[in-house]
């Protein structure tokens, strides 16, 4: 069922503490942890504890939690001191856009120059 933990989902397992991660922030509804394959000096993923396959599905089903993810992305940027240099919040959606884990997550990237448009 949408929102319920999925036994085959890596990020559900991280949210439940069943798979280790370098957690930088946690709230009742979200977990933020370092990406295992960082693409910038700061690369943190913010996930909802609820399982939804992508950001739009999360926002449709649980808009308050989607807002929590965005707020936490900003808190990560502040904690990591990357706001002054600029940072990017990315939600890859669909395999064609590079999504590999189908549990909604925000990438928070910063600490280096970020080209626009992204590749
Ligand atoms: P995406 O490709 O947008 O679905 O993002 C998935 C991200 O999860 C990638 O940047 C991966 O490097 C990252 N990732 C995969 N496994 C782990 C893990 N065990 N811990 C932390 N990050 C992970
Ligand atoms: Zn999940």
Image (cartoon, rainbow, N blue to C red):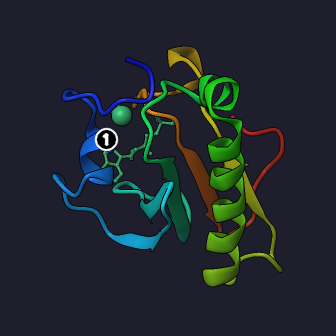
Q: Is residue 112 left or right of residue 3?
A: right
Image-quarter location of ligand 1: top left
Which image quarter: residue 21?
bottom left
115 or 13: which is nearer to us?
A: 13
Which image quarter: residue 34?
bottom left
- Residue on which disc 1 sits: 12
Report the label total. 1
Q: Position of residue 103 (x, y in %)?
A: 44, 32
**Residue 111 in sight:** no
Residue at 61%, 22% (x, y): give it: 57
Whether ligand 2 has any atom under 8 Å from the Cβ at mark 1 is answered as yes
Q: Is residue 36 left or right of residue 49?
A: left
Q: Residues within 10 Å of mark 1 (few under 14, many from 20)?
A: many
Q: Is residue 113 left or right of residue 12?
A: right
Q: Position of residue 71 (x, y in %)?
A: 71, 61
Which image quarter: residue 8?
top left
Q: Position of residue 87 (x, y in %)?
A: 75, 63
Q: Position of residue 48 (x, y in %)?
A: 50, 46
Q: Is residue 86 left or right of residue 16?
A: right
């Amino acid at each position: 069922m949408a929102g319920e933990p999925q036994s085959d989902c890596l990020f559900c397992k991280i949210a439940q503490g069943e798979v280790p991660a370098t957690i930088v922030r946690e709230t009742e509804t979200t977990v933020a942890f370092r990406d295992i394959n960082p693409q910038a000096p700061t690369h943190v993923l913010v996930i909802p504890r609820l399982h939804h396959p992508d950001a739009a599905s999360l926002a449709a089903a649980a808009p308050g939690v989607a807002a929590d993810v965005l707020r936490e992305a900003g808190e990560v940027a502040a904690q990591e001191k990357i706001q002054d240099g600029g940072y990017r919040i990315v939600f890859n959606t669909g395999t064609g856009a590079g999504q590999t884990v189908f549990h909604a997550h925000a990438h928070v990237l910063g600490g280096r120059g970020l080209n626009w448009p992204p590749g």
